[in-house]
Image (tube, rainbow, N blue to C red):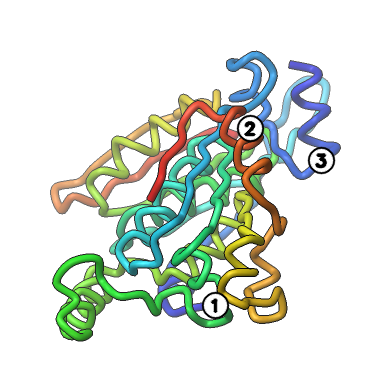
Amino acid sequence: MADADTTARAGSDDRATAVAAERTSGRPEKITIIVHSGDFDKMYSAFIIGNGALAMGMEASLYFTFWGLSRLKKGKLDSGPLSKMHMLGLGKAMIKGRMKKRNVRALQDMARDFKELGGKIFACDMTMDIMGVSAEQLEQDLIEEYCAVGTYIKEARESTVTLFI
Amino acid sequence: MSAVAAAVSQSRGRGSVSTQEEVIVVAQIKVDCRGENCPVPLVETRKALRKAQPGDVVEVVGTHPSSKKEIPMAVEALGLSLLGVEENEDGEWVIRIER
């Protein structure tokens, strides 16, 4: 416990995470999610699961690639279509209206929460090359690192939970 | 800060507990998540716990039914102490956690 307390005071980590870490042989459990889809509803799945994991004491990494990476462009986080029943935007407008009534937090705020709770966002640099996207076009303050498959594998092999969305 | 984020208010109050040897100052941190949906109560609880000092008490008030079950699950996973869970007839619950 003494070590855990010292970690909590010294670094950005807190005591609770250190306690959770002690139970899993030194490191907190981790979830790594590949965010391949840029669909509005799937973006919500990624951030809700990521934030839930962080809230319950896990580490969390989101690896944005392909259509998912496009959502990291400035101001584009919630601009994706619905994966089903988009209906030229009519379906999405209806879902967004219902979400607002039910007080569902906006994706931009969920992304800030994710960052605040210590989550890491990785941007696939090959996708950036293919799609002609520069780092300046992306929400750079959200992104931890611009990287490739090796980083994903490193994150995934340290994880107890991995998802592809 | 968005309107939704602004609706989640946190307030702090300080009190002191005397023991024979020392005076320990503990904070009562209140998190109001009434009307908020998944995963906001869980996330706001975690934010408050991260800011709290060991010994501080975080009190979360909310109405989202699943969070009443899941916040105690998070408290257990984090190795913290659950001081109590209460719910009134209107489905409003209060969870108290010691950091």
Q: Residue beneath label 2, please?
A: A17
Give me the residue at 31% from left, 44% from top: B67
Which chain letter matches label 3? A
Give me the residue at 25% from left, 77% from top: A96
Where does the image place residue A75, in percent across and percent down from the top left?
52, 82
Nearest the viewer among A30 and B67 is A30
Give me the residue at 62% from left, 31% from top: A16
Where does the image place residue A99, in percent across and percent down from the top left?
25, 71
Give me the residue at 82% from left, 21% from top: B21
Do marks 2 and 3 share a chain? Answer: yes
Q: Could you tell me the amino acid type at mark 2?
A: Thr
B51 horizontally vs A63: left or right: right
Query: Disc 2 or 3, which lies upstream in sequence?
Result: 3
Q: Is residue B61 above or below residue A11?
A: below
Which chain letter matches label 2? A
Nearest the viewer among B3 and B95 is B3
Q: Any mark on residue B73, and which? A: none
Circle 3 residues within 10 Å: few <14, some 14–19, many ≥20: few
Nearest the viewer among B92 and A155 is A155
Q: Could you tell me the amino acid type at mark 1?
A: Met
Element assignment for label 1: loop
Q: Is residue A77 above or below residue B37?
A: below
Element assignment for label 3: loop
Q: Any mark on residue B1, and which? A: 1
B48 horizontally vs A164: left or right: right
Q: Is residue A128 above or below residue A23?
A: below
Q: Residue beneath label 3, please?
A: A11
